[in-house]
Amino acid sequence: MEEELMAKKRPIISTGGRGGAADGKRRSLPMPARYVINALLVFVVLAVGELMVDGGAITRYQTSVLQQVGVYIIMAVSLNIATGYLGQLPLGHAGFMSVGAYGCAIFIMRLSEALGIGARDIVAGGPMVALLVFAGVVFGGICAAVAGVIIGIPALRLKGDYLAIITLAFAEIIRVVMLNIDDVLGFELTRGAAGLTGIPSYSNFLNVFLAVAIVCFLVHTMMKSRHGRSILAIRDNEIAAEATGVNTTYYKTLAFVVSAFFAGVAGGLYAGCVGVLQPANFGFMQSIEILVMVVLGGMGSMLGSVLSATVLTILPEALRAFSDYRMIAYAVVLILVMIFRPQGLLGSYDFSLSRVIERVMNRDFPWKKDKGADSGASVEEVSADGR
Amino acid sequence: MALLSVCDLHVSYGAIKAVRGISFDIDEGEIVTLIGANGAGKSTTLNTVAGLIKPESGSVEFDGESVVGVPAHKVVGRGMALCPEGRRVFTQMTVAENLEMGGYTRSDAENRETLERVYAHFPRLKERRGQVAGTLSGGEQQMLAMGRALMSRPRLLMLDEPSMGLAPILVQEIFEIVKQLNESGTTILLVEQNANMALSVADRAYVLEIGQVKKSGTGAELLVDDDVRKAYLGG
């Protein structure tokens, strides 16, 4: 999951020496072993977390903060697809989040009513509820993805500042639609400014954690595949990508829509955490806060997104008394990071547990200075690491 | 039959006509060059053939089939590869990854084989395969861009200003490689401002001026042509 991540093949990896192995061959983990290790890690963290939540070691308040952290991790990781990997600058991510949130909440409310599942049953859980929540969250994601297609196709004809402005405008349109759709068209969907209340609290530590793990895994897998490479090529040079045979329109739209889909998933979980949805929650500042997470963590680094989403969600909670100054702190931190570390805290570095294990297997530690570093050595590693 | 034949091509950028009725053709195995000053329409012609720009009118036939309106990413599969102006390597990928991207339309097995051939033409790239492309020198980036284009195993390789911004010795090296590639069977369409160099390697050449073909002939003929000498070769 978050720890496993995008081993994007950068010099960090490729020149990462070959110190210990005497026979000159690097011992490496086979792919299944990597999956098993990472799955085990996810499971251990999940089990410990569940025990602590159930045992009362973590208070309800802390659990709800943890859920928010999970939601924002998904938001940051999904925005990172469009900014870090595709290299665009959309400013309307909260718009997709709101579409997902409303879509999922309404879906679950209506369906649970129809199936006769009460709010208490939902909190209690069970296979039926799990299925309902899963369907709802995916439905939220699909709603957001549809919005992503509608916005993406015109928006992606533009670049840079223009794309930023048009996505910003679309997010505002979504917000205003959510606010007024009931009044204007006579629906009873979003309940406008009064807010959609009485959403059963279907999000809990378990399902948010699983969603985070699954989203990180899916994004990681996608970015390591041929599709991911196409997206990265577009970021590096769109014309060259087109000239080598990448269907740039398709992949730009794909990246944008996948990004929107996961934002919708996060929105769906968010609705289950907070219980009340108001269009005002998904304004411009929300989009900016998510962008700040991505930029701060390092565009193109999944671990960076995960860490900064965690810190920036917990920090205001921990400093409740100073929460009025949060925006000032954001601005100051951003300015400082942009001056001293324009590539973000982690740049494009990503952590990989398997890589660490491989280093230990090869007795190849950073403090061991590696003398015979030759650039040729890195290639087997690149391809072995690759697919 | 010509491998590529372009007939009465017109291309505009909005109200500005960049190409006004250019016709030329290339036979299999030739090196053909388009020379001319800035704004003559050389790169526009090349980009149009590659599918990056849609022409206003005119025909482009590759191997007997029209490629007008075929998007650039599909043109590659037909056997044409463009090495764009200004190199445009994937700066954050390694040399090896750049080359892999070049073989995007091919299978992994084919790419492994082609990669060895590309490394044979460009030993420097093999030495630097693990290096991030953005940190290569200009000459190496040009080689990488050419190698990347070759990875799709094109029948026609289109080179846009390969000498741009390179030291004279590197220009010579690049042109040596162009000749080698041609000898190993790749047809080459070369766009150049460095007319001297281009004419000395080309079998045939077309001189472009404000979007039209002003003159054409063999490289050797044009190299001694008075008008061409005055306009492009410094007397």
Image (cartoon, coloured by chain):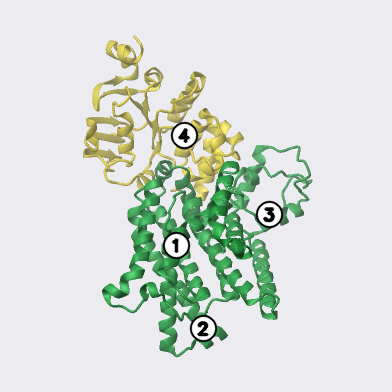
Chain colours: A green, B yellow
Residue under numbered circle 2: A129
Rounded to the nearest angstrom, the CA distance separating label 4 from label 1 is: 43 Å
Residue type marked 4:
Met
**Mark 2 to mark 3 CA distance (whole Å):** 38 Å
Which quarter of the picture shows residue A3? bottom right
Relative to A135, is B58 on the left or the right? left
Q: Is residue B77 above or below residue A209?
A: above
Do pointers 2 and 4 mark residues of a single chain? no
Mark identifier at residue A355: 3
Q: Amino acid at mark 2?
A: Val
Q: In the picture shown, does residue B128 fall above or below B108?
A: above
Parent chain of label 3:
A
Q: Whole-Å distance between the Cαs marked 2 and 1?
A: 27 Å
How would you rate the neighbour count of disc 1 (Cα within 10 Å): few for under 14, some for 14-19, many for 20 or more?
many
- Give the labeled residue for mark 1: A94
How far is mark 3 from mark 4, CA to CA? 33 Å
Quadrant occupied by the N terminus of chain B: top left
Rendered image: mark on residue B146:
4
Q: Chain of mark 1?
A: A
Disc 3 secondary structure class: helix
